[in-house]
Amino acid sequence: MKRVILLILSLSAASAFEPFTVPTLTTKSGKLYEAVRIIKKLPGGISIAHGDGGLAKIPFEDLPDVIVEKVGGFDKEAAAAQRKALAAAEAKHEKKAIESLTVRSDAANRERLDKDESAAETGAARAAYLEVVQSNATGGSLCMPTWQKRIPVMGKDSFGRTANTGKTQLVDDGSESKNLIMVVGLSGLVDGDCVTVALVPLGNHNYTTALGAGATVRKYKVLGTPTPAEKREIYVPARPVLPGGSMRRIGGG
């Protein structure tokens, strides 16, 4: 309470201050100012204009005694309280600025990592034609894949020469393995549905068949949105899937 009263009294005294000029002002720390106009008395010091438009604030403790007396003296406790309050305000502002910068930096890093992860997934993705064999399998959907690749679409230029049109198309890449895979991310599909989709490998998936036997298949997750496709005639192992199980023909005829 005492500091608050001292600060109020100091502010009252500052309000009665009249600006004045001095040819030079040398602080106790040795800094020289020329053509000085003392324009304001503050609780902790004075504000001056000097030279050709320069501005500065000088604490009372660094002022020559003659200047301190001319501005009406100062209260050491009030000056210390004001400096403490200013320091606290500056520290709070700096902390807030650092926290804001950290949040922005974290967000930028997260966005960069997300882009990197997305790019990595896109680079690892394989196109495939899938027929759903068991849509409600534990861990995803059991599907029979036909792996695909993109090739350029060729056409004729204005001179009748074969040329790249700049477009691509998906074709089977010849690596159809006749092995089931587990696919994560297929929703709203039932047994026998067919889609074309990009798949990202997730490793192996172990599961138990309806007959209680263990089986291991490759596991993939869907990248992007599957596109419905017409059913083809392909071979898939008869369900439940067993190592070396029988094969049955589905689709087509």
Image (cartoon, helix red, strand yellow):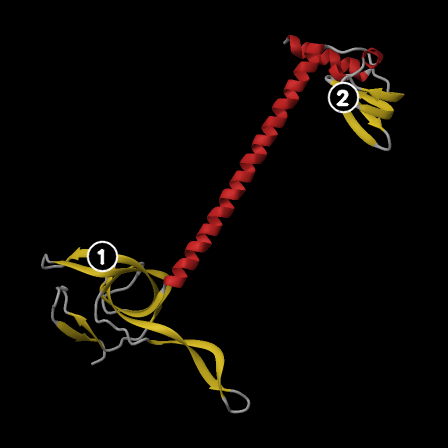
In the drawing, does residue 33 fall left or right of residue 161? right
Badge 2 density bin: few <14, some 14–19, many ≥20, Cα 10 Å: some
Q: Most extreme residue toward the top, as rendered? A: 2
Answer few, some or many: residues within 10 Å of disc 1's Cα (few below 14, many 20 plus, some between 14 and 19): some
Q: Which residue is mark 1?
A: 205
Badge 2 or badge 1: first in the primary sequence = 2
* Position of 202 relative to 161 (above/below): above
User: What amino acid does circle 1 point to?
Assistant: His
Classify residue 172 as left or right of residue 58: left
Q: Secondary structure at mark 1?
A: strand
Q: Quadrant of the C terminus?
A: bottom left
In this view, the mark in front (2 or 1): 2
Cβ atoms at labels 2 and 1 below 8 Å apart: no
Secondary structure beneath dot 2 equals strand
Which label number is shown at residue 192? none
Point out residue 194 in the picture as x, y percentages from the top left corner.
29, 70
Residue receiving disc 2 = 58
Residue 67 percent across, percent down from the top left:
83, 14
**Relative to 17, residue 122 above or below:** below
Q: Is residue 61 left or right of 99 when viewed as pictured?
A: right
Q: Position of residue 97 (x, y in %)?
A: 58, 35
At horizontal 83% and vertical 16% (from top left) the residue drawn is 17
Three-letter residue code for mark 2: Ile
Depth order, front residue of 152/1 = 152
Q: Position of residue 27 (x, y in %)?
A: 79, 19
Distance in Å between CA atoms under marks 2 and 1: 74 Å
Task: Work out whether 111 lies above or below 90.
Answer: below
134 lies left or right of 49: left
